[in-house]
């Protein structure tokens, strides 16, 4: 290591200043037309423009200063750490784990089980609506979707960009069958899963021969086709208006959560009317569904079919040469993944009471895929952490009303939700390309099970 | 018959725009094997840059000739998106080159989300209409051809020729083709691979900017989420033509444009995108490498 890489050395500082100025100039031109100029419609509805030099200056300054700091301090720091690690010769995955690490799953599960009551205890009935619904249920839906997609992408290595289609199939199955035929949630939940799995097979068949990016684009196309059909087949799906007034889930048919009904839950237990009980009930349903997904995934990985998926991901040609039927392997992966998407979809419809094609845009697929990759493909814990960070993080942003005090009353944090989500996706990928959990525990091993670095597993080429 | 020819002309116009965007996808894919998901949003940025230039130019010089105005819009748009795409490649894709394959795809999807939301935040979520720029219309028999359609096709043809010339006849093009075939070997033989890839991104973005400006001129409206659907269609076009193949991208673009306009003319407008995607699926199922793509050899 030469002295030039030391922090504070004039060479580094001079370089940092140069790079900072360069970044400033570049960003000035980049943002000149989009930030420096604002276009808006005047009273006559004609498009006019005005300048925003102040805002432009802020953008340029932020770019220049952050580039300067990166080059001057952050990069040398990272380099030094890497060097120290390489010198010490310690493997990336260490065997020593502290108490929290070892019992992380148990702690997380217990926390999730008591979470609704904890929030009831701390913030009361009205306050916990937000915590149970917006945070708990919302995050768990994404955890379930991401775990479902993980079977397709993480285990079988088939890049699927249209996963939201199966979510839509599940949601519309429940919405349509319950409003046209009056079937109950508990009948339709498995049925939506089966229907979605069926769609998984139908859409999986034609794409069996496709590999990698071609597979990605065709699955994206299928996702869009299903959404467009939902929009345009107005006689059945009511188009963009969506289907509203979808029946709520009942407590296994014993108690209903509709306020007016005779066997209402609140009456039976002598509680005061509040929608929080339904939300808590839903929270436990989605938690159970998530656990089911995790259980099935873990069990399947140890079965021949799961091993076949992973073999397919690692090397398709070797897989075929060894006599594994790639057709059934791929189709079961699609169908299993789709089934969990279908479960999540029907749950979503029951929770929302309203479905419309708006909820099933490509962006959702992208978000789910991002969660899978950011978590570290194939790692259930990592994916759950990624879902909490990414979905929870954007939900937290809704709550940041104190930012209004900083940026003025016109500031709406929600507007920046997806912007920050996208930025977070990029930043996490840049620093942790292997995802939050970078180690894997292979299912097949020699002598003893040992965690390996994620870079030893392939991402699959479909 | 006249109706058919009319639709053919409309499809050709639309197809030219898709073709220009598709070239950006196909070049980037060819050279670094990555789906640049943000390319559709680069196209949208190009449209917005053209919109801002249009507003500024018309408010300063009320009687500016249309040809000059258009040239200005195209040039500034190309410079702007070139700069953006260069920066994006440097910041979000280059550090991940050589990392595992899904990583740049995820940053590209993230970039796409960032770009469309950035425009939504800075320019507002509403559609931005501009007054029509080119209104002349020719009548040939029973067919109407508007000047803007002619302009779009001519500009596309000129650009394609220039582009073909650069890729096939210049040292830069040779470097690009060499990098595409074998990046390591090209580097060993003295090709500046990083620079070549950067230039490829800039060229793709410039073409997308032209497409964006023409899209704005054709429809007279720009919106922050204009990037997604045309982007996906252009990508579809690139795959349809055989990803990695330049003539394939143009052919795919024209085909998608024709399918779209003929389907809306004879069947139903509502399902035109369904038709596009369904045909894509069919082509790929029966000819998985696209129309002009090279068959991929699987090596062990």
Image (tube, coloured by chain):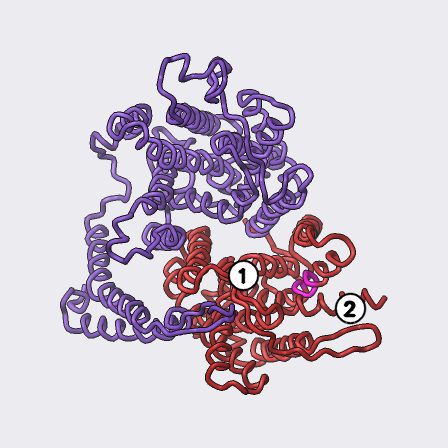
Dominant secondary structure, magenta: helix
Q: Is residue B20 above or below residue B111?
A: below
Q: Give the range drawn in magenta.
A: B252-257
> B275 left or right of A81?
right
The answer to whether residue B86 of the structure is visible from this angle is no
As drawn, is A23 to the left or to the right of A418? left
Q: In which quarter of the image is the C terminus of chain A?
A: top right
Q: The purple chain is which one?
A: A
Label 1, label 2: how many angstroms apart (C-alpha)?
A: 25 Å
Q: Position of residue A191 (x, y in %)?
A: 59, 25
Q: How crowded is mark 2: few (under 14 residues within 10 Å), some or many (20 or more)?
A: some
Residue occupied by mark 1? B226
Callout 1: SS: helix
Residue situated furthest front in the rendering = A43
Q: Mark 2 points at which residue?
A: B6
The correct choice, above or below, for A441 with respect to A224 in the image is: above
Q: Which of B259 and A159 is in front in this view?
A: B259
Q: In this view, does A438 lie above or below A187?
A: below
Q: Which of A117 and B253 is in front in this view?
A: A117
Q: Chain B rendered in what hue?
A: red
Q: Quadrant of the N terminus of chain A?
A: bottom left
Which residue is more in the foreground, A316 or A198?
A: A198
Q: Of callouts 1 and 2, which one flags the residue occurring earlier in the amino acid sequence?
A: 2
């Amino acid at each position: 290591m030469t002295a030039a890489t030391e922090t504070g050395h004039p060479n580094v500082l001079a370089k940092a200043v140069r790079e900072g100025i360069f970044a400033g100039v570049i960003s000035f031109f980049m943002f000149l037309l989009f930030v420096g100029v604002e276009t808006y419609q005047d009273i006559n509805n004609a498009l006019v423009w005005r300048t925003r030099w102040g805002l432009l200056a802020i953008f340029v300054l932020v770019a220049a200063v952050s580039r300067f700091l990166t080059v001057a301090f952050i990069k040398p720091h990272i380099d030094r750490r890497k060097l120290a690690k390489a010198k010490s010769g310690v493997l990336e995955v260490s065997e020593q784990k502290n108490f929290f690490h070892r019992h992380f799953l148990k702690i997380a599960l217990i926390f999730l089980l008591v979470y609704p009551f904890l929030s009831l205890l701390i913030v009361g009935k009205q306050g916990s609506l937000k915590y149970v619904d917006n945070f708990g249920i919302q995050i768990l839906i994404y955890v379930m979707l991401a775990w479902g997609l993980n079977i397709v992408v993480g285990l079988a290595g088939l890049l699927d960009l249209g996963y939201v289609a199966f979510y839509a199939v599940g949601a519309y199955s429940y919405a349509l069958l319950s409003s046209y035929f009056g079937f109950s949630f508990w009948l339709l939940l498995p049925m939506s899963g089966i229907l979605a799995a069926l769609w998984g097979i139908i859409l999986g068949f034609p794409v069996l021969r496709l590999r990698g990016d071609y597979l990605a684009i065709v699955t994206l196309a299928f996702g869009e086709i299903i959404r467009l059909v939902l929009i345009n087949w107005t006689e059945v799906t009511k188009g963009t208006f969506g289907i509203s007034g979808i029946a709520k889930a009942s407590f296994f048919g014993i108690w209903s959560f509709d306020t007016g009904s005779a066997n209402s839950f609140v009456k039976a237990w002598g509680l005061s009317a509040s929608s929080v009980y339904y939300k808590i009930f839903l929270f436990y349903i989605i938690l159970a569904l998530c656990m089911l997904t995790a259980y099935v995934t873990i069990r399947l990985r140890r079965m021949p079919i799961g091993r076949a998926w992973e073999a397919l991901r690692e090397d398709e040609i070797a897989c075929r040469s060894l006599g594994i039927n790639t057709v059934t392997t791929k189709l079961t992966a699609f169908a299993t993944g789709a089934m969990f998407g279908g479960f999540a979809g029907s749950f979503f419809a029951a929770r929302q009471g309203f479905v419309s094609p708006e909820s099933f845009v490509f962006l959702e697929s992208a978000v789910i895929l991002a969660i899978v990759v950011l978590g570290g493909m194939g790692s259930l814990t990592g994916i759950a952490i990624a879902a909490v960070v990414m979905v929870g993080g954007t939900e937290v942003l809704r709550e940041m009303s104190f930012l209004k005090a900083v940026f003025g009353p016109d500031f709406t944090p929600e507007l920046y939700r997806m912007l920050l989500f996208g930025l977070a996706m990029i930043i996490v990928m840049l620093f942790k390309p292997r995802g939050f959990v970078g180690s894997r525990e292979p299912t097949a091993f020699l002598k003893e099970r040992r965690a390996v670095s994620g870079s030893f597993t392939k991402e699959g080429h479909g | 018959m006249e109706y058919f020819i009319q639709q053919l002309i409309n499809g050709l116009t639309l197809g030219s725009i898709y073709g220009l965007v598709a070239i950006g996808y196909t070049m980037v894919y060819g050279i670094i094997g990555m789906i640049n998901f943000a390319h559709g949003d680069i196209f949208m940025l190009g449209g917005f840059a053209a919109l801002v230039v249009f507003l500024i130019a018309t408010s300063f010089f009320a009687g500016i000739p249309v040809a000059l105005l258009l040239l200005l819009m195209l040039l500034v748009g190309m410079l702007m998106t070139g700069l953006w795409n260069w920066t994006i490649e440097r910041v979000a894709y280059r550090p991940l080159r050589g990392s595992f394959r899904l990583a740049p795809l995820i940053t590209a999807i993230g970039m796409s989300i960032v770009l469309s939301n950035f425009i939504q935040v800075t320019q507002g979520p509403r559609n931005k209409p501009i007054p029509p720029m080119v209104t002349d219309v020719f009548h040939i028999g029973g067919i109407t051809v508007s000047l803007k359609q002619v302009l779009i096709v001519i500009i596309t043809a000129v650009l394609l020729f220039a582009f073909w010339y650069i890729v096939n006849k210049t040292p830069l093009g040779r470097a690009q083709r060499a990098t595409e075939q074998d990046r390591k070997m090209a580097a060993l033989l003295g090709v500046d691979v990083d620079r070549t890839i950067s230039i490829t991104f800039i060229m793709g973005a410039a073409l997308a900017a032209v497409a964006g400006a023409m899209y704005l001129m054709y429809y007279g409206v720009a919106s922050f989420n204009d990037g997604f659907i045309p982007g996906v269609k252009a990508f579809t076009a690139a795959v349809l033509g055989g990803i990695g193949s330049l003539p394939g991208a143009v052919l795919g673009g024209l085909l998608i444009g024709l399918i779209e306009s003929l389907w809306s003319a004879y069947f139903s407008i509502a399902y035109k995108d369904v038709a596009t995607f369904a045909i894509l699926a069919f082509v790929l199922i029966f000819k998985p490498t696209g129309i002009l793509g090279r068959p991929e050899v699987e090596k062990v």
